[in-house]
Structure formats: structure tokens, C-alpha cells
Image (cartoon, helix red, strand yellow):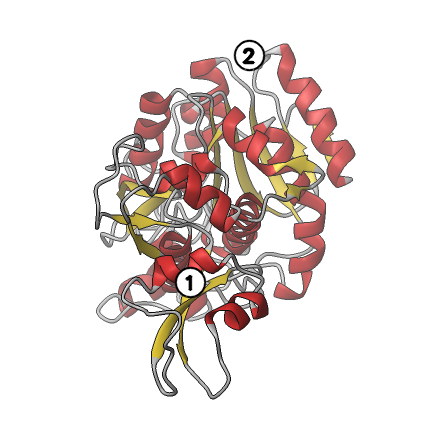
Amino acid sequence: MEVRVRTGDTLWHYSQLFFIPLVLIIDSNPNINPNVLQNGQAVQIPGFTEDSYVIRQGDTIWKLAQRRNLNIDVLLLLNQDLNPSKLQVGQKIRLPSRVTKLIVNGKQAYDFQKMKTDLDTLGSIYPFMRRGEVGKSVLNQPLYNVEIGKSSRKVQINASFHANEWITTPILMQFLNEYLLALTNERTIKGVSALTTYLRSKLTAIPMVNPDGVNLVVNGPPAGRIDELIKLNKGSEDFSGWKANIRGVDLNKQFPANWEFEKERKPKEPGPRDFPGYKPLSEPETKAMADIAIKENYERLLALHTQGKEIYWGYEGLEPPESEVLANDFASISGYKAIRYVDSYAGYKDWFIQDFRKPGFTIELGLGHNPLPITQFDEIYTHVSGIFVRALM
């Protein structure tokens, strides 16, 4: 929600008026000098939307403020041309509305467009949330990254490397929404102060690594590529089991961490799953994910997959001692099983551990056959959302 600066206003005053932590207002306005506000300057107030209200018989500015549990100065700030002693029936004024409920509805088929729409809405309500792109997919869809936090200590959580594991995206999106909501309402999240977490770590979320593949599984093949994709899918028009990107490359078998070993024992040509490509990092999605990890120097990395209710945390003995501590904490929080080694290579967390010697985790959400039914959403979220908070601590 936007307000206009009056003579004598400060961001601290807005923080007190709206009960929003000052740091969130400052971070919502990166182009403003918080110590030198200009009269008439636009300031974004996070955690609020606004309504248009039509004055009725008997309304007064004091009654309207009391009805919404607001300081009168909030209404005067939003309606600077208003004469509070001369309200007129039929007159329209602006009223603020604190956002107290989730925006994201993850319990539905969740494709790239739904994610983008939710990110657009969250970005407008919570402008301290930063959104950028780490790269593009084969079909030129952006791989969005979302940043929440003040610290130089960075933690990456990603989802939907595999197309038929798309439920991981709305799980992560709901967590982002819950975290943002807790910040602007000064709540805890999973028993931890959201603001303390915000100041301690910067969360980088990449909620859909494989947008082309997710759209294929959720919506079917795009026009112009139907015959090509049916051929890659062994003649089947059922794409529900498709894991790969749109070119038939398994994105989580693309990283230079014993890639040659996977190449020898996996499919030798593109298809719906497990083909590691003709060389490491051949796909734009994997190249983007490698580049961002090198650039950002994350302290920890979590890759969300399905299924198995397991947490993989080791790679070739290269993981630091902290990994075992975190894995045991994650297991205790979620009820999932922590497993150090698994017979799989060339994954994103494998490469991250190998190249950075920092804690990396593959977390297999839920249990059953991929794609997991959306009816598991609430159970999965209950089990794993606490892991995300622990990863930021």
C-alpha cells in the first residue's frame, strides 16, 4: 500500500502507526533515504492493501478509525485532502486493510502461471520481498528466485527440479506466504520469531526449476511440440510420469559430480526420465542453477523432491560435520528418515557438497507414487515446513 509523505513524517512514525517493523518498511523502499524524506514522496507500507469506502450517514473519522482499530492519523495520512470535520455522504475515502490471511492456495494443479500470479500478488503486498531471475528455461520461461531476509548469510531452497514432483512448488510457495505474513504481523513461525529469522539469514527460494516440464505434466504438451514429445514419451500421450525438462533431460542428473558414472548406467537418449544429457550442465536450467550457487556462495542448500519421507545429506564423505547435526534436526522435526548415502549421483546437492563443502540436502516429500495426489498437501506441509525454518537458523 502506498502513502505520501507529509511534512514532519518519518518511517519510524509509519512503523508505529501501522505496527510494522521499521526494517521491513526500510527494505520495502530501497530507493528512499530513510533519514531524509521528501514532502509528497511515495512510500510503500508492506502487509496492507487498501479499500475504497463510501461515506454513509452518521460516519465520522473517529468512528471509522475505531471500527478498524486504527489510529486516526492513519486515515488522515491516506486521505490528505480530506476535511475530517466535514465528511459528506457519498464521498469516497481510502481505508487500509491489514493482510492477515494466506494468498497462496497450493491445493490445486499448480503450473508456472499460477506460481507467477501468486508471486506478483505477494510482491505487491510485501515489497521487501525481492524477485529476480537466475536464468531461463528451454522455452524461455524465467527461473524466478525470491529473496527474503537482511543477512549476507544465504540459504537456498529450490523445488520442481523434476516435472512430476510439482507439488514441491506450492509447498514452498505456501511457506513463503506464511513467512511473509508472520513478518508483517509480528508473529512467530513454527515457534521462532519471524523477524529474528529475517535478520539472521537471507532465504533464496527458487520455487520452479523446471517450468516447461511442470507445465507439460499439469497442462499437457504445448502446441507445435505434441508429436515430438509423444515420441520422446515412448509413444504415450500420458505425461503424468514425466520427470525431465522439455528436451527429455533429467535436470537432477546433470551436475558434474560423478556424472560419468550416471551416464554409463542411465538411458542413453532423451526421454521422460533419467537421461543425464550428453554432457554435464548442457541444459539452460542446470547451467543457471550452477551459476547462481557459484555467485551467491550459499551457506546451506535444500532441494525439494518427492517421494519417500527421507532426507539425503551426504556425498562421498565430503559433507561437513554440521550436515549430520542438521539432518538429525530435520528428521526430528519432520518424522522423516535421515540417510547419509544413497546410490545416486550427479544431483544438485551432490555437486553443491562436492564443490563447496557445505551442508546440502535432498528432501523427499511425502510417500506414494509420483505425482503425489494433492490430497497429501496439508500432511506434507505440516511435516516439512519446520525444516525450512530450522535451515534458516
Which quadrant would residue 194 be assigned to in this image? Answer: top right
Spot occupied by residue 141 in the image (x, y as percentages of width and height) = 27, 53
User: Pointer 2: what residue?
Assistant: 318
Residue 259 seen: yes
- Residue 171 vs residue 126: left or right? right
Task: Say which residue appears at 39% left-offset and 28% top-offset.
Answer: 255
Of residues 351 and 385, the one drawn nearer to the viewer in this rendering: 385
What residue sits right under mark 1 in the picture? 75
Rendered location of residue 18, percent (x, y):
49, 50
Please state the horizontal and vertical placement of residue 121, each as a whole percent of the image: 39, 60
Residue 76 rendering spot, x and y as whole percentages: 38, 61
Location of the N terminus by quadrant is bottom left
Asked whether residue 206 appears in the rendered view, the answer is no
On screen, residue 108 versus residue 11, left or right, reads: right
Query: Looking at numbered disc 2 in the image, what kind of residue is underneath it?
Result: Leu
Residue at image position (49%, 20%) is 299
Q: Quadrant of the C terminus?
A: top right
User: What element does badge 2 sit on?
Assistant: loop
**Callout 1: few (<14), some (14-19), or many (20+) C-alpha neighbours within 10 Å?**
many
Residue situated in front as seen by the camera: 370 or 375: 375
Q: Is residue 301 left or right of residue 309?
A: left
Q: Who's the residue at 50% across and 25% down the image?
A: 350
Of callouts 1 and 2, which one flags the residue occurring earlier in the amino acid sequence? 1
* Above-or-below relation of 122 to 30: below
